[in-house]
Amino acid sequence: MAPQEPQFDVRLAQSAEDVRAAQALRYDVFVRELGGGGADVDHDQCLEKDRFDPFVDHLLLRDHARDHAPVVGVYRVLRDDQARAAGQFYSESEYDLSALKASGRRLMELGRSCLHAQYRGGAAMFHLWQALADYVAAHQIDILFGVASFHGTNAAALAQPLSLLHHRHLAPPALRVRARAEQYHPMDLLPEDQIDRKQAMLETPALIKAYLRLGGVVGEGAWTDHEFNTTDVCLIMDTARLNARQKQIYTSPRGQS
């Protein structure tokens, strides 16, 4: 018998149980699969959580074609008003966000995006992004940003993709955040004429490539996150500068299946 087609639905978490479902999927992906950790990870309950979870909104992607409609994708969003309540944005521990905060524009941080392994490469991420589009429109967000990760902490091994990001996708000065000094690593590891673009793109995670296609740019410097076993870059998207084709994902009706 052929597997049943997914029946996706995306909603905001409404209860502690919903948040735990998001944290459980995050544990599967970030801890079990990618080897991440952190002081707040609950290994006994298999939950990846941190102090920001009570302040954010959690977008949950469920597949109603499966028993009990499990959560198969999550996105965590932190608006500027929520960040004030939390005391800071999550990524402020890694990046100096002064340029963004001084812009006077409505900010929202994206984070903890992940999909269950069985749902990657298909329509699942599209449904999450359509829900994110609705959220962005509803809250009149001007700037989207957040850290995105390469697996592993050896930045030198990522010379091709990091150099490509620095030379061809660096944010304009008015939006250019900078990695903090403690774990700062330069991204211009190769001269621009030594970049193998094909190899660099092959080594770039799909989510980062998706942000670049939407007109995303990066801050200056990478951050080495030893707890999560990643090398992070800060991606920034100015929604006003998206071209018509790119902007469609933020204005088209949410797809249903």
Image (cartoon, rainbow, N blue to C red):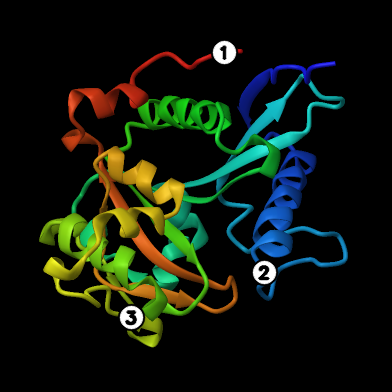
Residue in front for this viewpoint, 170 or 163: 163
Mark 3 vs mark 1, CA separation in Å: 42 Å
Describe the element under mark 3 as helix, strand or loop: strand
Q: Earlier in the sequence, mark 3 or mark 2?
A: 2
> Whole-percent x and y of residue 76?
55, 46
Question: Residue 229: percent from the left, percent from the top?
Answer: 57, 73
Tell me if 72 is positioned left or right of 187 in this view.
right
Whether the residues at callouts 3 and 1 have beta carbons within 8 Å, the answer is: no
Q: Are marks 2 and 1 in contact (CB under 8 Å)?
A: no
For marks 3 and 1, the one nearer the N-term is 3
- The residue pinned by badge 1 equals 256
- Which residue is found at the position 33% from the left and 59% from the top? 199
Figure quadrant of residue 164: bottom left
Q: Is residue 209 visible?
A: yes
Determine the residue positioned at 55% across, 79% down: 226
Q: Residue 70: x and y, percent?
A: 78, 33
Q: Which numbered tag is attached to residue 10?
A: none
Callout 3: 10 Å neighbours few (<14), some, many (20+)? some
- Indicate the secondary structure of the residue bearing disc 1: loop
What is the distance, in whole Å, between disc 3 and disc 2 at their CAs?
21 Å
Q: Which residue is mark 3?
A: 185
Where disc 2 sits, the SS reads loop
Say which quarter of the image contains residue 221: bottom left
Vertical order, 42 against 60 (above or below): below
Residue 128 rendering spot, x and y as whole percentages: 53, 31
**Residue farthest to the bottom, as pictured:** 182
**Residue at image mark 2:** 35
